[in-house]
Amino acid sequence: MNVYEIIKRPLITEKGHTKRETERTLAFEVHKDANKIQIKQAVETVFKVKVAEVRTSIYSGKLRRRGRFTGYASDWKKAYVRLAAGSKVPEYTEI
C-alpha cells in the first residue's frame, strides 16, 4: 500500500486544532485496513517528523437520506498521531 493511500486526508476540526496546539497530536482519516505501524511510517515519510504514538478508532457509517432515498455512508478509520519531542508540528498547507 502506498503512503498516500494510507493517509487519505487530515481532519481539520476545532478539536483536532486544539490537540495539535496543546498535545502535538495530528488527526487523519486513514485507510480502513492500515495498521498502526503502517500509519506511523506513512506520517514519518510524508511529513518528515518522528512519531511517538498512534491511536486509531473505527467509525461505522451513518444512515443518510436524500428525499425518499436512503443509504449508509461508508465506514471509516481515524488516527491520532502524537509527535515525538523535538519534532516540528507541520502545517497542512506546507505539504
Image: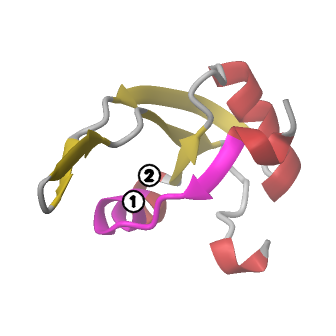
Closer to the camera: disc 2 or disc 1?
Answer: 1
- Kindly give the residue lying farthest to the left in the view shown: 68
The answer to which quarter of the image holds residue 75 is top left
Residue 55 vs residue 85: left or right?
Answer: left
Is 76 drawn above or below residue 17 in the view shown? above
Q: Residue at x 83, y 53 (%)?
A: 46
Magenta stretch: includes residue 31: no
Residue 16 vs residue 26: left or right?
Answer: left
Q: Residue at x 76, y 42 (%)?
A: 5
SS under mark 1: helix
Q: Residue at x 62, y 34 (%)?
A: 31
Of mark 2 and mark 1, the one earlier in the sequence is 1
SS under mark 2: helix
- Kindly give the residue lying farthest to the bottom in the view shown: 93
The answer to which quarter of the image holds residue 68 is bottom left
Crowding at mark 2 (Cα within 10 Å: few <14, some 14-19, many 20+): few
Of residues 7 and 89, the one nearer the viewer is 7
Of residues 26 and 5, the one nearer the viewer is 5
Residue at mark 2 to residue at mark 1: CA–CA distance: 10 Å
Which image quadrant: the C terminus? bottom right
Crowding at mark 1 (Cα within 10 Å: few <14, some 14-19, many 20+): some
Q: Amino acid at mark 1?
A: Gly
What range is drawn magenta here? 7-19
Q: Amino acid at mark 2?
A: Glu
Q: What residue is shown with label 1?
A: 16
Residue 23: x, y in percent?
A: 44, 52
Which image quadrant: the N terminus? top right
Of residues 17 and 70, the one nearer the viewer is 70
Is 78 drawn above or below residue 67 in the view shown? above
